[in-house]
Amino acid sequence: MAEDRFAQIRPYHDDEVRGVLDRLLANRELVAAVTRLRFPRCAGPCGFVLRPLAALYLRRQLAGVDDVASFQAVVEKYMRSMIEDSTTDFTVSGLEHLDPARPCLFIGNHRDIVLDPAFVNYALYTGGRETVRIAIGDNLLTRDYVADLMRLNKSFVVRRSAKGPRQMLAALQELSGYIAHSVLEERASVWIAQREGRAKDGWDRTDPAIVKMLALVKPRSLSLAAHVIALNIVPVSISYEWDPCDVLKARELHARATQGKYTKEDNEDVASIAESIVRPKGAVHVSFGEPLADEFADPEEVAAEVDRQVLALYRIHDSNLAAYRRLRHGLPEGFGDGSTLVAADAELDARLEAVAPEHRPYLLAMYANPLINRAELDTARRA
């Protein structure tokens, strides 16, 4: 048997699925988390009664699941239910222009820990395409059951906790190698974020370090442009009308601006995941771009092209228009006069009222920034 050199970071294989699921079904922490999600109002005082029901529900849902495809079929049902309960619309564009027979390395903007790749996967799944392998930082895998669930759903681990130059380089080489192995050898599509961490302020920009990481395993005989084309890099832009974690993000942005740092509470990321699943998101749009095919001279040029497509493809919502108008006292050319923003203004008022006064400018800016970026891009096009 060939050496499984990516065993510690790769998603689970089909023959591992049933064993992992049986381990999860015995995990009290997971059962408690499912209880809180399904019965948010009663899980506290009635948890001792509801947890056995949640465990039974899980066992029934996962009965007969013995490979990745059947597990993702269960996930699809949860996604469909979440979309019905917490969004007003879910739309997709651009997928029809991509060759279904050719795997892609999708590089997307990053607003939500779990939902970004989940919505991309749902768009692919319902469009009859293969789902992606998802890059997820080990800083989010603070609980064993979370790591198991992610790896069952085709996620692979990015070792952000590596310390020291040698360990960090080894982790980056492993990551680069696994992405190339997935796309070029196993013919599997991959999704990664355009930067480490979410763009909590709504300012979507690709970190050239991501491109440098991808090139770590590039053959010396191959140019950067040829490697980019071989990986079939496709930008993806996802936009939420209403960010389910906007209040939490505004608090963090204020802390970083006033104190220079923000210290997360224990399990804060897991709590953010739960918030993002259940809270209203309004309309959500996923837009797939075109494969990168230019003669890029350096990682900065690759990052700039990803940025151009992400910003151009971003679906501007009424929430962005309403926030921009408050900050700039008007709207940019081509975006109307704001006369249709009554509902968006009311929702924005409600969200601003829900946060401390000192956090409000940050919440307002995170909604306005996508339109600021789009307006600058449109101006540059016309110049």
Image (cartoon, helix red, strand yellow):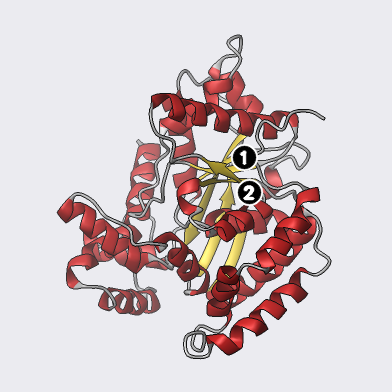
Q: Residue at x 47, y 90 (%)?
A: 45
The quarter of the rendered structure image containing the C terminus is top left
Report which quarter residue 19 is drawn in.
Answer: bottom right
Q: Position of residue 161 (x, y in %)?
A: 43, 41
Give, as a three-letter code, the residue at label 2: Gly
Q: Nearer the viewer, mark 1 or mark 2?
A: 1
Circle 2 crowding by C-alpha within 10 Å: few under 14, some 14–19, many from 20: few
Residue 285 seen by the camera: yes
Horizontal placement of 275 versus 356: left or right? right
Quick check: marks 1 and 2 in contact, CB under 8 Å? Answer: no
Number of callouts: 2
Q: Which mark is residue 149?
A: none
Q: Residue at x 42, y 62 (%)?
A: 267
Q: Which residue is mark 1?
A: 8
Question: In the rendered view, would you say 47 is above or below 271?
Answer: below
Counting from the top left corner in percent of width and height, residue 252 is at 28, 59
* Badge 2 element: loop
Question: What's the distance in space between the residues labelled 1 and 2, CA to CA?
Answer: 34 Å
Q: Residue at x 64, y 74 (%)?
A: 81
Residue type, label 1 = Gln
Q: Please name whichever residue, 232 or 308, is drawn nearer the observer in this view of the structure.
A: 232
Q: Nearer the viewer, residue 202 or 145?
A: 145
148 sits left or right of 166 in the view: right
Q: Which quadrant of the figure has residue 184?
A: top right
Say left or right for 118 vs 283. Answer: right
Q: Position of residue 68 (x, y in %)?
A: 76, 54
- Tell me where residue 254 sits by quadrant: bottom left
Residue position for label 2: 94
- Compared with 106, 86 (above or below) is below
Query: Which mark sits nearer the N-terminus, 1 or 2?
Result: 1
Disc 1: CA contacts within 10 A as few (<14), some (14-19) or many (>=20): few
